[in-house]
Image (tube, coloured by chain):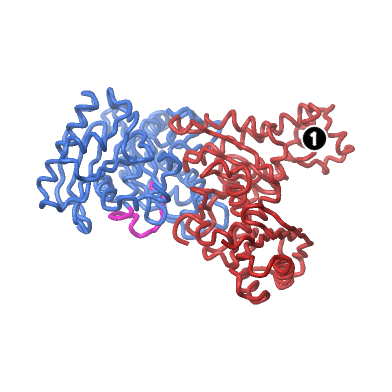
Chain colours: A red, B blue
Amino acid sequence: MIPHAIGVDLGGTNLKAALVDRDEGIVERTERSTEADEGSEHVEAQIASIASDLIDAAPSGSVAGIGIGAPGAVNWERTTVSQPPNFEDWGSVDLRSSLQSRTDGTLPVIVENDANVAALGSAFYGAGQHADSFIMVTLGTGVGGGIIYQNKIFRGSTGGAAEIGHMTIDYEGPYAKSGVSGAIEGYLGQEFLVQHARDRLVNYPDSTIRDLVDGDLDAITPRVLHEAANQDDELAQTVLAWAGHKLGCVLGSAVNLLDIRTIVVGGGVSGAGDYILDPARDVLPRFIVPGLRDNLRIVREELGNEVSLLGAARLAFEGEQAQVGTP
Amino acid sequence: MIPHAIGVDLGGTNLKAALVDRDEGIVERTERSTEADEGSEHVEAQIASIASDLIDAAPSGSVAGIGIGAPGAVNWERTTVSQPPNFEDWGSVDLRSSLQSRTDGTLPVIVENDANVAALGSAFYGAGQHADSFIMVTLGTGVGGGIIYQNKIFRGSTGGAAEIGHMTIDYEGPYAKSGVSGAIEGYLGQEFLVQHARDRLVNYPDSTIRDLVDGDLDAITPRVLHEAANQDDELAQTVLAWAGHKLGCVLGSAVNLLDIRTIVVGGGVSGAGDYILDPARDVLPRFIVPGLRDNLRIVREELGNEVSLLGAARLAFEGEQAQVGTP
């Protein structure tokens, strides 16, 4: 088996890539600014350049292919990225063709949604290694998701499955950005979570949160909440527990539908760890039919961003085996 | 290919079976009382007897196997039914062994959850024929579900997937029987739906519903609501629309998670047709992330109970191909 692959993590701000060894994980990594505001042609050239550098660094013939995790919608054929948020002048771009024409053209190129890629990385290198099937939830700016079923990505009918962030837990609840009432992203998306803390500060005049941001409430971030919680701040702990409770509710719905009992939680907001996850674990069984309540596990993905690079490379190692059903 | 199979629909009240032709559908059907209160041994003998009669009616060697749709939990190996509601003295019964020892023992026997079986029947013989992948919702005493992905049943990790009835649409909503707050079964399950109509009658003193049940409010059924709606009864139409709205909300969550855009609705309560389904169709896109809102379809399964017999037989035709992933 060819030992290496290139994994690319295409973010709105940073473009990351790694040379990955099938067994050992990341061998070499590199990163640059995406410069997404300069248009798709520029970004395509950036990806080709960063990938070529890594291919050149690997022994000749040792690279199986290039996998790319991208935001936005990825088509069923895993070639094309459409409407990624925060990219200028993008529309719909066939990254496979683009990259093959900009490199020597012999390497397979596979594109996949970034949340699915993170899940695949977790399945082979991270917290997901211990389960054949799991639901990955990525808590960041938004709430993303990936479904791994029998070690493969479940992509749905068109490649758009696992939009956990848009599942509702309250059909008359607050509107999330997507327009869905009570969608979990409207509670746990970074902006919503922070706003919730801000709104409640009035009842906690002595909260450490104020001190941590020097009174600048716009500077509150999930990391600040985590830090305050670590300092026994009651408000921070309350807000994170409130968020975890909501997370548990939506995960209950997902478990009912999928009968997948392991949940892996990643993304920046998951840094708050058990402050969020313990309340989620508490409430989870109450939102699941009794017959599916055994062996529930919510674990944190500890690999951080690396999981995306590893998962992207894994796309190339797995080829068509990376997904459930007929590609 | 062997042309026939036996499909068995094990209900708490009635035991139905059919000889099914692979292409033509039901050739012959039979039915008797399950007598579930006489214990599992008796029911097992009943199933063996009804199946044997049909096997004898078919040309020798023309039967591929016996498929059984059963309530309760069915294990991963598709042999054993545990804790079916409304069955006395059952516990956990290996129907495959039981049936093979009670018949000549040469035919494959495959057991599957009844909601999954209905979905498989719809996929090959009913409204689901027009979609490779769809979500089946069965509106009856409870709210059941089945997921068909690329013409196969998605069973989850243990065979328990597609418990749509227990997904929440309101984490602080009313408790359904399962103990899940705001579970859709707590709105659309037959008993809950009828109670909702009863509770609202106070505001509709002239409702046709009273006349249809001769003033005996305990006699209200979903069929009565449908009949009243057909007679332009405002309350009946309002209640069915209320139920349809809730159905649309939960289906939105399911579409977000699965990226499966066709929904097939069956079961007795679905007899109310567009009174329920039109409001569901209206609200559905509002509960789905924008990228997954195209090509949504909610259709009614018109085959009624036959779909369960056809699906059960199909289990035998498909064998291990009946399910997604590794059996």
- The quarter holding residue A57 reads bottom right
> What span is in magenta?
B123-136
- The quarter holding residue A302 reads top right
For the residue labelled by badge 1, is the local secondary structure a helix, a strand or a loop? Answer: helix
Which residue: 25% across, 43% down? B109
**Residue A212 in picture, x, y percent from top left:** 86, 36
Against A21, residue A143 (above or below) is above
Can residue B216 be seen? no
Can residue B17 be seen? yes
**Residue A187 in picture, x, y percent from top left:** 66, 40
From the viewer's side, name the closer residue of A269 and A180: A269
Q: Chain of mark 1?
A: A
Image quadrant in which the N terminus of chain B is located:
bottom left
Residue A191 lies within the magenta run: no
- The quarter holding residue A109 reads bottom right
B147 relative to A254 in the view: left or right: left
Q: What amino acid is at disc 1?
A: Glu
From the viewer's side, name the closer residue of B149 and B282: B149
Mark 1 crowd level (few <14, some 14–19, many ≥20, 10 Å Cα):
some
A327 relative to B46 in the view: left or right: right
Q: How many marks?
A: 1
A290 relative to B319 in the view: left or right: right
From the viewer's side, name the closer residue of B59 and A165: B59
B179 relative to A185 in the view: left or right: left
From the viewer's side, name the closer residue of B70 and A239: B70
Which residue: 67% across, 74% down? A103
Residue B127 lies within the magenta run: yes
**Residue B236 in picture, x, y percent from top left:** 37, 39
**Residue A177 in picture, x, y percent from top left:** 65, 50
Report the residue marked by disc 1.
A227
Against B37, residue A254 (above or below) is below
